[in-house]
Image (cartoon, rainbow, N blue to C red):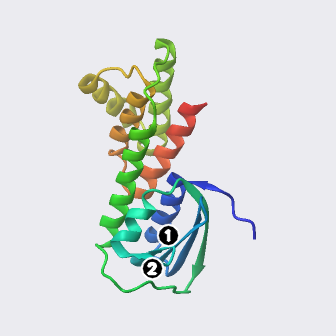
Amino acid sequence: MNNPHLSRDEIMVELCEICQQHRSGTLFITADGGHLVRVAMQQGNIHSIEFDAGHSSIEAMQELENITGGRVQFAENIFENAHETPLPDTQKVLQRLCDSIKSLKQGKTPAKPAATGSMALCIKAVEAELANFIGPFAKFTCNDYLEDSGEPKTLNEVEKMILSVATEIDGEVERQHFIVAARQTIAK
């Protein structure tokens, strides 16, 4: 079976979905650079993370934060447990991994100025994408953000807007879906 290459964001969304579905098994990630990551979980709770068989637990989680993409496969009810070094609870693990997505994007995306007209289009695109998740409240959420932070002048500032308004979406999986979709829309 040929698994498609996923971005880091898409891998994290996949991990969140598996946890939210309370599945049990091991998520195998063949990360760019030939790294192998194994995330073992039971009923949606992450029990262990192993990175290249040399790093486990918190150290493996730190390595996982630095991947850029790869291929994933979930083996239902197959457990490849790393050393049973305790991890924080699953919600804290997912939050940390999602926070690292934000810092990676903010740290590596150059502040490219954009034409004023295109910024207005970006704002409308973010609002339209957000409306798919929270309905008509998207307009108010975006307007509140613009009042508090001002109109974005760079793509980095649009990224900050996306991450800020995403907090209005209940559920980590849906929030990550919005972030990925909004970024893809802006990139077009």
User: Going by the image, does 45 lie left or right of 13?
Assistant: left
Task: Farthest residue to the right: give it.
Answer: 1
Residue at (53% x, 59% y) in the render? 11
User: Going by the image, does 49 lie left or right of 78?
Assistant: left
Q: Position of residue 61 (x, y in %)?
A: 39, 67
Rendered image quadrant of residue 148: top left
Badges 2 and 1: C-beta atoms under 8 Å apart? yes
Depicted 154 relative to depicted 87: above or below = above
Residue type at tag 1: Ile
Q: Which mark is residue 41?
A: 2
Depicted 163 relative to depicted 151: above or below = below
Residue type at tag 2: Met
Residue nearest the viewer, comparing 181 with 135 = 181
Residue at (46% x, 13% y) in the render? 116
**Where, quadrant-wise, is the N terminus in this rendering?**
bottom right
Can you identify the residue that label 1 sits on? 18
Task: Farthest residue to the front: give it.
Answer: 54
Q: Position of residue 107 (x, y in %)?
A: 39, 40
Residue nearest the viewer, comparing 93 with 169 = 93
Is disc 2 placed on a helix, strand or loop?
Answer: strand
Is disc 1 placed on a helix, strand or loop?
Answer: helix
Q: Position of residue 126 (x, y in %)?
A: 46, 32
- Circle 2 or circle 1, nearest the eye: 2
